[in-house]
Amino acid sequence: MQKTLLASLIGAALAITGCAEQAPAPTATESAQVSESANDTVSMENPFFQPFALQYQAPDFRIIEDEHFLPAFERGMAEQIAEIEAIANNPEAPTFENTLEAMERSGELLTRVSRVFYNLVGTDSNEARRAIQSELAPKMAAHSDNINLNPALFERVKSIYEQRENLGLNSEQQRLVEVYHQRFVRAGALLTEAEKEQIRALNEEHSRLTNQFAQNLLAETRNIAVVVDTVEELDGLSRSQIQAAANAAADRGHEGKYLLSITNTTRQPILTQLNNRELRQRVWEASAYRAQSGDYDNRPISARLAQIRAQRAALLGYDSWADYNLETQMAEKPEAVFEMLGSMLPAVVANVQAEQDAIQEMIERRGGDFEVQPWDWEYYAEFVRQELYDLDESEVREYFEFNRVLHDGVFYTMNRFYGITFEPRPDLPTYHPDVEVYEVFDHDGTSLAIFYADYFAREGKRGGAWMSSFVGQSHLLDSKPVVVNVMNIPKAPEGEPTLVSYDHVTTIFHELGHGIHGMFSNVTYPTLAGTSVSRDFVEFPSTFEEDWAAHPEVIGNYAKHHETGEPIPTELLERVIQSRSFNQGFDTLEYISASLLDMEWHSLSADSELQDVNEFEAAALAKHGVDLEAVPPRYKTTFFSHSMGGGYSASYYAYMWSEILAADAFAYVQSQGGLTRENGNHYRRNILEVGNSRPTMESYIEFRGQEPTTDALLIRRGLKLSVD
Ligand SMILES: [Zn+2]
């Protein structure tokens, strides 16, 4: 979900900390018209109209129906507009309390319904919800603009901003003033009326197109699932995978056939297993050419989105959308991003070349008479990996049983490092039977948060993994966090244990890293809480936690055979850990290529013509010397939801930036004694609790004693052996 200005103003209601593509932005065709009379009949029983009675106002999913959403949104918007008008037209002189604090308190109903609705659209989409989403999009965009472009409101904020040094404000309050002022300016508060009209029109079109992009992608993903006629073609898949493919085909009316779904990246995990080269090619092409033709063509939408963003940036006085976007990031300037990515390329490309040589040699040794193609890379890389590490993924999975990973790995680490515990709360209602609820207790036994664990894949859930909140932390609103983690782990059939990959293990750690960033939040103002930090900082706390997965004290506690309970053999464990740096050239390059593609799309100037997507993409990759046929970008434009569809436009690089911080911080913690409560407290206090209540670099230096360096990152990725 794009972190819109509205989201910030109504308390980050729509913020989803993404580790994959964004929640589809809402859309529709007509402008907002609230019909009060139509709502009266449901107003008495609409559960959103008052705070939920459950602990920490956790949503009561037993009484929420799809028909409640629209009336709640409409009333929520109307209420907030009334609140904002009252603030803007207050005859008293502007003060921090009667303006900023009042704005922080506004939109309570809208925040409540938005958080539930946009979470459910991500985790449990259906026809009705998609229709609501479409209808809401232009209304929400208009609502956001009605606040952000209110001149009387801006005058008050500006007046407080100008006097901020002399108002006796504490540092968090001063920060809030600065954040609000900057947001208004960036939303166009200093523009003329005619220019504001142009911004409004662009915002509305942008909102409609990002939603269409996402909806196209969802439909296309279903549309392009590969139907396989015979079981022989599936050679290489496990029995349960074949069964799942047969079930999926039957569900879709292809009785007796097999259906292979396409997952979100260009690269498809199943390619490591399929022995049939033609089928590999079909799967890869279905993925790589998705949404490039037919009913769900995202090319014209992508081209126009890039243009809209450039035009919006120009109106606001910036050279490009990238310039505009980076202003509020830790990186600050596009040049810093190009420089950071570019500086890594020589080492990365050298690694890719060595990997490709090894793969080509493997193809020939196995009797192949062809040059490695993208659909071959993962398949033959697996042979090279096995030869180097003799690692059988399915053997490794035997030691990663889902429940044990979660409880004895992830929760265990959180207890060792921070002293927190997770107690099941089966009494709290959920939106799906697969979701588990926990109450999280602090080291001293006080209750800290509610945590929803939604780890398993299902139809209607969008791809990837992410964290979000149903309720945010705020001392002002006296609210405690209600947080959710979402993943897409394939669930084992009834009665069988779910065995996960090591990647899944680290992702569970990662998402809970976001989770505790939300849960440990300890600020007054909702706008500054938890994960409301810049894009290039937000993945730092999550990536930081990933590396515990391989920490000896942690892995020894959870990596046990699901049948015998035997710990993972040391020698196997060492190979698992060493193999992590395998294929890092490819992994890093596909990521950097996608980041560069994202940056190039958003470096266009406002007077650039609509681009031909395929030509633009090819030229952008060639420009940076990353147009390697066998290593396509992790996402291509038409399914690059981070970049085109949502909140990571000109920000996809942010994962790498955050990883620099994470690697540096983790190495620092290890140098200070590792998994100790003292380290956990120090990190929690300086990084996790403060949210965005002070500049992120300031927080980092407070924690680390110095600015980060890239040494630990390069070592973490196996691109460098040690610190120079
Ligand atoms: Zn993440």
Image (cartoon, rainbow, N blue to C red):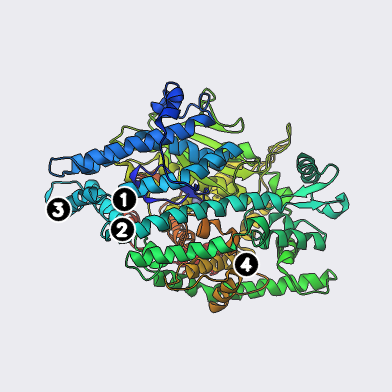
Mark 1 or 4: in front is: 1
Mark 1 or 3: in front is: 1
Q: Is residue 687 left or right of residue 394?
A: left
Nearest the eye: 579 or 143: 143
Amino acid identity at mark 4: Phe
Of callouts 3 and 2, which one flags the residue occurring earlier in the amino acid sequence? 3
Q: Is residue 480 visible?
A: no
Of callouts 1 and 4, which one flags the residue occurring earlier in the amino acid sequence? 1
Nearest the eye: 451 or 220: 220
Using the numbered discs, state the Cα–Cα distance from disc 3 to disc 2 in whole angstroms: 24 Å
Relative to residue 603, is residue 8 depicted above or below?
Answer: above
| Proximity of marks 1 and 2: CB atoms separated by less than 8 Å | yes
Judge the density around disc 2: few (<14), some (14-19), many (≥20) Cα neighbours within 10 Å. Answer: many
Q: Is residue 32 left or right of residue 407?
A: left
Q: Secondary structure at mark 1?
A: helix
Q: Is mark 1 within 8 Å of ligand 1?
A: no
Mark 2 or 4: in front is: 2
Amino acid identity at mark 1: Asn
Q: Secondary structure at mark 3?
A: helix
Q: Secondary structure at mark 4?
A: helix
On the image, numbered disc 4 is attached to which residue?
586
Of callouts 3 and 4, which one flags the residue occurring earlier in the amino acid sequence? 3
On the image, numbered disc 1 is attached to which residue?
148
Judge the density around disc 1: few (<14), some (14-19), many (≥20) Cα neighbours within 10 Å. Answer: many
Which disc number belongs to residue 188?
A: 2
Q: Which quadrant of the view contains residue 589? A: bottom right
On the image, numbered disc 3 is attached to which residue?
165
Which disc number belongs to residue 224?
A: none
- From the top left corner, tell me how far across and down residue 266 is, in percent: 64, 60
Of callouts 2 and 4, which one flags the residue occurring earlier in the amino acid sequence? 2
Nearest the eye: 437 or 61: 61
